[in-house]
Amino acid sequence: MKEKIIDNSKILGIILILTFLISIPYLNFEPITAHDISYHTNRVIAISEELKAGQFPVLIHSNLLDGFGYAGPLFYPELFLYIPAILTVLGLNFLTSYKLFTMITTFFTFLFTFYSANHIFKNKNIAWTITILYGASFYRLADIYERGAIGEVLAIVFLPLILCGLYEIIFGENKKWWIICFGIFGLINSHVLTFAMSIILILTICIINIIRIFKDKKRLATLIMAGVISILLSLSFVLPYLEQSNSGKFNVDEKIYSGAFLQSYTVSFKELINNSFNSGDFYKGIGTILLILPMFIITVKNEDNQSKFMKQLFWIGLVVLLASTSIFSWETLCNKFNSITTLQFPYRLNIISTLLFSFAGGYTLCNIIGNKIELNKLIYILLILFTLSLLSSLNINSGNFTEEKIITFAPVGNGEYKPYALKQKDTRVHNIANEEELEFTRISSKMEFEYTNKEDEMIIHIPLAYYKGYVAQIEEENGNITNLIVEKEPHTQNIIVKNDKILNGKITIEYKMTIMQKLGYTITYVTFLGLVFYIGINKYRVINENKK
C-alpha cells in the first residue's frame, strides 16, 4: 500500500512538472491573442456574472447580445467553464482565470492519458511516451496558444478515456467498462463536434471488431450497457439542446459555410509536417514526429491484442488524416449532405488523428526500443526539449490585444445561436398598443416593471431575444398571481408578453428551466451518482476479497 502511494505520488509529480513546462507561455499576466479568445473569455465572464446574480445553472448569458441575452449554454456545453468562472467570482482577473484553466486542462490531459495508456499496456515506458506525445502534441498546443479553441482543448482531455474504455470492453478484462462512460460524459460537456466525431470513431472500431464482440455475449452485453449509460449521462445537454433547436430558427440553421469554404481549409502535406509556430496556418498540421513515427508500426510483428488494437488505430488515423487534406473532396460531400458544413474546418479532424497517432506512435517507438529504460528516458527528455524549443518561438499576443479588445472583439463569435433575423434595436419595455414606455429593473435574466392600464390591450415588447423557457406573470395589488403569455415577435425575434384580461400590477419576466431541461439534468445526475456508487461497491468488494 505504501509503495503504491509513493508510486502514485511520483506519477503526479512528473505530471505537475510536465504541466508547468507546457504552460510556460501563460505564466504571466499579459493579454493574449487567439482566434476564439474573445468568444470563450466572454463565456467565462458571463457565467461568473450570472452566478453572482444568483442564476444557477446558467442557461442565459444576459449581458451578451447588447443585453438581449444569449442562450449559448443551451447549444454549446459549459459545464467545465464553471471552473474559471468560479475563480473569477473569487476575485481573479478573467484572463488569469482563463490561463489557469488551460493549465488545469493540461494537467488532466497528461493524467488521463497516462492512466489510459498504462491501463491498456501495463507498461509505464509506453504510457509515458504516449502521454508526452499526446499532451505536448502540435495540434493541442496550437489549439491552446493560437486558436484559443477551449472546447477542443477540453475534449482532448477525455478522448484517451474513450480508447481505454473501448479496449477494456473489446480486448481487455471487461471489468472497467465504465471508463468509456466518463469519457463520453466529458466529451458531450466539452465540445459537440468532437463528440460527434468520437461517436463515429467508436462505431468504426466496433465494426472492425464486430466478430470478436458478437462471439463473446458478455462483451456485447457490456458494450450495450456502456452505450445506454453513456446516453443517459449525456441527456443533461442533449435534451435541452434538442428542445431549443426545435423551438425556432437560429443562425446556425442557415447554411453559413459552403462546401467550397470547407475545401479551402483542407490541409497540404507541407502544413501537416510543419513544426513551427512562426509559419502561416501552422494549426492545420500535426507535426513531423507524430506524422512519421506511427508509420513504423508496419514493422511490428506482434499479434497480441494490444498490437492489433494499435494497428487498427493507426489505419483509422491514416484515413482520418487523409480526409483532412486536399485530396478529399469536401465540396462534393457537402453538396450532398449540407449538415456536414457545421464542421467548418476539415483540419478539425486532426484532433482524432492526433489521438490515434499518439497511441500508435508511442507503442511503436517503445516496441522498437524494447525495455531499454535509459534510452526511454532520453527520448522523454528529447521530446520535452523539442516542445520547449517550439514554445520558445511563440508570441502569445501577436495581435497586440488589450484586455478590453479581448472582451469586445467577438463576444458571441459568429452568433450561431442567435434567433434568426434577431433585431437588437428597440431596447425599451413598452406597450405596443399605445407605445407607452415602462420603466423596468433587471437582474440577470429577470425583468420587473409596473403595469397600469385599464383601457388598452396588454401586448408588451420586452428587449430580450426569444428562447424557449422565458415565463411571465403579473402580481396584482390583492396578491393574485396570473401567468401571462410569452410569445416571439415574428419580425424582431424579441419577446412579447400579453394577456386577454386587462390586469394591473407588477409584471415579472425571467428565464426558468423547462420541464425537458429539468428531466435531462435529473436523469444525468441520478445516472452519474448511480455509476459512482456501482464503482465504489465493486471496489469495496475487491478489497475485501483481497484481504481474505
Image (spheres, grey):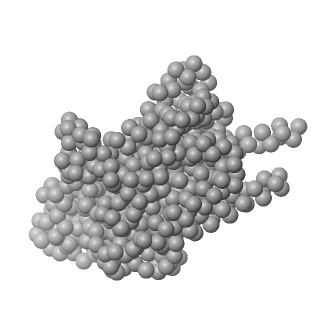
Q: Give the residue furthest to the left.
A: 434
The residue that appears at 66% across and 53% down in the rendered structure is: 375
The image shows residue 225 at horizontal and vertical percentages of 56, 32
Residue that extends furthest to the right in the rendered view of this protein: 548
Q: Is residue 153 above or below residue 120?
A: below
Q: In which quarter of the image is the C terminus?
A: top right
Closer to us: 193 or 139 = 139
Q: Is residue 309 depicted above or below 36 in this figure? A: above
- The one nearer the camera, 419 or 364, is 364
Q: Which residue is drawn at 47% across and 38% down?
A: 314
Say above or below: 458 vs 166: below
Query: Is 522 on the left or on the right of 548, as rendered?
Result: left
In the visual, does 321 lie left or right of 496? right
Looking at the image, which is closer to me, 495 or 266? Answer: 266
> Is 236 left or right of 251, judged from the image as shown?
right
Residue extending farthest top? 215
- Is residue 355 visible in the rendered image? The answer is no
| Frontmost residue, 360 versus 102 | 360
Image spot of residue 371 (x, y percent): 69, 45
**Looking at the image, can residue 299 be seen?**
yes
Q: Where is residue 348 in the image (x, y as percent from the top left)?
A: 36, 50
Q: How many marks?
A: 0
Seen at 27% across and 40% down, the residue is 328
> Is 519 positioned to the left or the right of 373 in the image?
left
Q: Which residue is drawn at 33% across and 78% down?
A: 401
Whole-percent x, y for residue 460 in the image? 20, 65
